[in-house]
Every structure is written in C-alpha cells, then in structure tokens.
C-alpha cells in the first residue's frame, strides 16, 4: 500500500509539472510574438528597442527551459529508450558549452577537451539534455562568479565527462539520495529553484546508455559530477552504425 501510494504521489507530481510547463507555453508564445512585432515596426526609440530586446531574449530563455522541463517530465514518466548512433564528444561538448553560456548567469564555462577526439554510441539529444542539466545544476549551487569547468577524459575504455563547480558541498549521506526522484537537499532546497527530477533523469539516461553517473563533493575540491559512457574504438565503429 505504501509503495502504491508513493507511485501515485510521484505520478501526480509529474502530471503537475507537465501541466505547469504546458500552461506556460501559451503566454510565452504571446510575449514572444508581441516582442517580435514591436521590433519589426521599426518605430521604437533606442531605449525602447533595448527593453523590448531584453523581453524577447528572456522570454526565449523561459521558453527553452519550459521545453526542457516538458521533455524531462515525459522522460520521467516512462522508461528511457535511447536511439543509438555514433556521437563525437568534442563537437557535442563545444555546442553544449556555447548554448549554456546564457543559462549560467555570471558563471563562466571552462572547457578542457584534452582527451582528444572520442566517440560514443548514444542518443545525441538525450546526452545533450543530460550534460546541460549537470551544467545548470552546477551553476545553481556554485559560489558567486566562480567558473564551471567541463572536462573530458578517456579512462578504461570509457569516456568520462565531468562538470565541476566551487560552492556548496553535498554531504556524503546525501550523495546517493540526490539522484532519487523529487529529492531536494534540506540544506539547499530553499536557496535554489528546481523540480527534483533533473538528476534522476540524468542517471537513468546514463544507465540506459550502459554508463553511469556519480558525484564527488568535499570542502577542498568542490563538487564534481561524472558521466561515464562506453567508448567506441575504431574497431567497433562499424557496429554502432
């Protein structure tokens, strides 16, 4: 009975998140269309055009976040079945880092691709969502103006993507719980917004790719999330195709 009650509770929360995300879509569409219409008139003063440009920019950000939450809610409500293809890690990381620059506030994103040109068998959109979630999550809890470091290395026939931030430390007793659905740390849940499903979806995505996701966190080194994925070697590339 307790398990069934928990299942129904989780389904209700997923439904609420999905409903809220859909509810945001209509007003955001109207705001974006109105801002574009004002810009296209060409009759705005310089200061008015600047303000309308800000409205358009941030409405687009909200629209992207809404789409991301919609996607996550759908992933959370069913089993994740990746559509596998060859994914080159270098261009994927470079693309994600560029797209996340506007989503991490005043934090800079440092990229270390010292591992060279590596390829995995994966679902590129799903991997992009997962790594983006790790970057945005790092920015939420990082110390003000500190950098977010995105690194790639090769380790035991695996590609390991790491996302590091300086800031709040995740207590050892919570380092497994943060990957549970809807879990929010009592120490930080009032300091940063979130639904509590992002890391859960990220771990399930990693496991669906026969990989893993874990975290190391302490006061000395900061917090680092690691995403490990099986590496495709030249001898195995034809299999992935």
Image (spheres, rainbow, N blue to C red):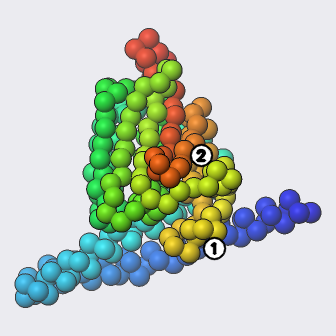
Pointer 2: what residue?
A: 203
| Quadrant assignment for the N terminus | bottom right
Spot occupied by residue 95 in the image (x, y as percentages of width and height)? 30, 46
Spot occupied by residue 112 in the image (x, y as percentages of width and height)? 31, 38
Q: Which of 223 and 151 is in front in this view?
A: 223
Residue plotted at (37% across, 44% down): 150
Residue plotted at (29% across, 47% down): 110
Residue plotted at (43% across, 17% down): 233
Nearest to viewer (mark 1 / mark 2):
2
Q: Is residue 130 visible?
A: no
Furthest residue in direction top, as rendered: 235
Dot 2, crowdedness within 10 Å: few (<14), some or many (≥20)?
some
Distance from disc 1 to disc 2, alpha carbons, whole Å, reads 22 Å
Check the image and report above or below for 1 versus 208: below
Label 1 secondary element: helix
Dot 1, crowdedness within 10 Å: few (<14), some or many (≥20)?
few
Check the image and report above or below for 8 versus 76: below
Pointer 1: what residue?
A: 16
């Amino acid at each position: 009975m307790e398990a069934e009650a928990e299942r129904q509770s989780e389904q209700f929360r997923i439904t609420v998140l999905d409903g809220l995300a859909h509810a945001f879509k209509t007003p955001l569409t109207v705001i974006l269309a109105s801002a574009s219409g004002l810009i296209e008139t060409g009759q705005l003063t310089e200061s008015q055009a600047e303000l309308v440009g800000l409205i358009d920019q941030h409405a687009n950000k909200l629209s992207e976040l809404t789409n991301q939450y919609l996607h996550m809610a759908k992933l959370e409500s069913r089993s994740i079945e990746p559509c596998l293809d060859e994914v080159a890690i270098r261009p994927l990381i470079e693309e994600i880092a560029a797209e996340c620059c506007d989503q991490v506030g005043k934090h800079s994103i440092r990229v270390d691709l010292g591992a060279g040109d590596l390829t995995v068998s994966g679902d590129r959109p799903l991997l992009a969502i997962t790594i983006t979630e790790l970057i945005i999550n790092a920015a939420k809890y990082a110390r003000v103006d500190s950098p977010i470091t995105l690194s790639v290395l090769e380790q035991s026939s695996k590609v390991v993507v790491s996302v590091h931030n300086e800031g709040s430390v995740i207590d050892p007793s919570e380092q497994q719980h943060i990957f549970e659905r809807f879990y929010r740390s009592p120490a930080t849940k009032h300091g940063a917004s979130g639904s509590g499903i992002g890391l859960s979806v990220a771990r399930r995505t990693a496991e669906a790719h026969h990989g893993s996701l874990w975290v190391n966190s302490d006061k000395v080194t900061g917090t680092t999330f690691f995403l490990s994925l099986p590496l495709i070697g030249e001898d195995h590339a034809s299999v992935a195709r």
